[in-house]
Image (tube, rainbow, N blue to C red):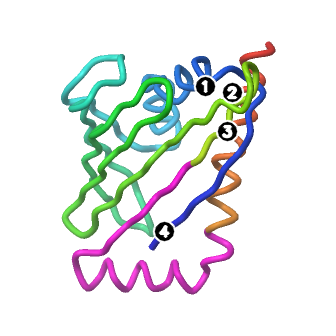
Amino acid sequence: MEFTTRDDIEAPIDYVFDQVTNFANFERSIMRRGGDVERIAGGDAAVVGTKWRVKFLLRGAERSVMAEIVEVDKPNGLTFEITSKSADATMVIDLVALSRARTRLNVKAVAKAKTIPAKLLFQSVKFARQKNQERFKTIVSGFAKDVETRFFG
């Protein structure tokens, strides 16, 4: 299962990279939505090996995943590996400087089920693929708008 989207941001690439790697902000956002985040390796900087344990509710069941930064190419992007007992995923965030003041944000998320229940869950997601792709795009677009607002604010 794969979701991709892109959005152009009216801000320099270095600023956008700093926002993409503002992990404390993302951790607070997850906690505000009822999740639990624990950083188990690494600090505030985007470095390979930074890890988190994240617990959250999905479809009425508590889920637990491990997320780790596996590649950093400042200011061009980074790659995360997300693992759980039932599925693995990779998320690639790629930044492209379109000009000195404009950056393209490309986000690609690929997930693979490891268990039969996860395969069934992914199948239901695939049935509503368009709706889920739009939801993914809305989330990334919202982030892009927030980055622009902070840059000009």
Residue at 67% across / 76% down in the picture?
130
Q: Is residue 74 above or below residue 54?
A: above
What's drawn in magenta, residue-wise? 107-132
Depth check, front residue: 75 or 120 = 75
Residue tagged 1: 16
Give the vertical position of 132 relative to 128 (above or below): above
Q: Residues within 10 Å of mark 3 (few under 14, many from 20)?
A: many
Q: Which residue is mark 2?
A: 147
Quarter of the C terminus within the rendering: top right
SS class of the residue under badge 4? strand
**89 relative to 91, above or below:** below
Question: Distance of mark 3 from mark 1, alpha carbons?
Answer: 9 Å
As helix, strand or loop, the secondary structure at mark 1 comes to helix
**Which residue position holds label 3?**
104
Front-lying residue, 92 or 140? 92
Q: Which mark is residue 2?
A: 4
Q: Residue at x 57, y 36 (%)?
A: 95
Mark 2 residue type: Val
- Was residue 110 drawn as part of the magenta stretch in this picture? yes
**Residue density around tag 2, few if under 14, some if 14–19, many if 20 or more, within 10 Å:** many
First in sequence: mark 1 vs mark 2? 1
Reading the chain from its start, which is encountered first: label 4 or label 2?
A: 4
Type of the residue with mark 4 = Glu
Residue nearer the viewer, 140 or 93:
93
Q: Is residue 58 magenta?
A: no
Categorize mark 1 by other alpha carbons within 10 Å: few (<14), some (14-19), many (20+): many
Q: Where is the N terminus found, in terms of image quarters? A: bottom left
Q: Tell us which disc is closer to us: 4 or 2.
A: 4
Distance from the alpha carbon under mark 1 to that under mark 2: 7 Å
User: In the shown orientation, is residue 148 left or right of residue 66?
Assistant: right
